[in-house]
Amino acid sequence: MTDQTPSRGRQATAEAADTFFLMAPVVGSGFKGEALAGGNVAIVSLGNTVATAAILMVIISVFGPASG
């Protein structure tokens, strides 16, 4: 087996994409949660937590090998 580490450019690009793809759902779920929850902070927090956990699992699966 060979252990090939991705180049610095590829790692930086993957990290930038990771950041974008994590921030977009978190911010979006916050806005949508506020609109739909009717002032119930617990529902907004739950929505943010579920959205963050789900997208984080996807990001790690997709970009993990590229970012090292």
Image (cartoon, grey):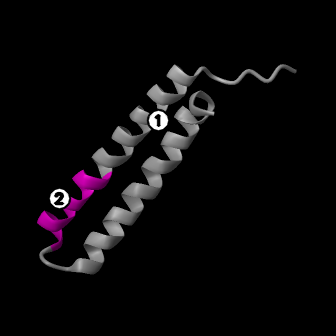
Sequence-first disc among 2 and 1: 1
Q: Is the magenta stretch mostly helix, strand or loop?
A: helix
Q: In this view, does 35 lie to the left or right of 14?
A: left
Q: Position of residue 15 (x, y in %)?
A: 47, 35
**Which residue appears at 40% of the width and 33% of the height?**
17
Residue 47 placement: quadrant: bottom left
Q: Mark 2 near mark 1, Cβ–Cβ under 8 Å?
A: no
Tell me the CA gap for discs 2 and 1. Answer: 24 Å
Q: Nearer the viewer, residue 42 or 60?
A: 60
**Which residue appears at 21% of the width and 64% of the height?**
33
Q: In this view, does 63 lie to the left or right of 19?
A: right
The disc at residue 15 is 1
Disc 1 element: helix
Q: Nearer the viewer, residue 45 or 11?
A: 11
**Which residue appears at 52% of the width and 22% of the height?**
10
- The magenta stretch spans residue 32: yes
**Which residue appears at 74% of the width and 21% of the height?**
4
- The magenta stretch spans residue 5: no
Q: Give the range drawn in magenta.
A: 26-37
* Number of numbered discs: 2
Q: Identify the residue position indicated by label 2 in the image.
A: 31
**Which amino acid does the dot numbered 1 rest on?**
Glu
Does residue 68 sit above or below 5 in this rendering?
A: below
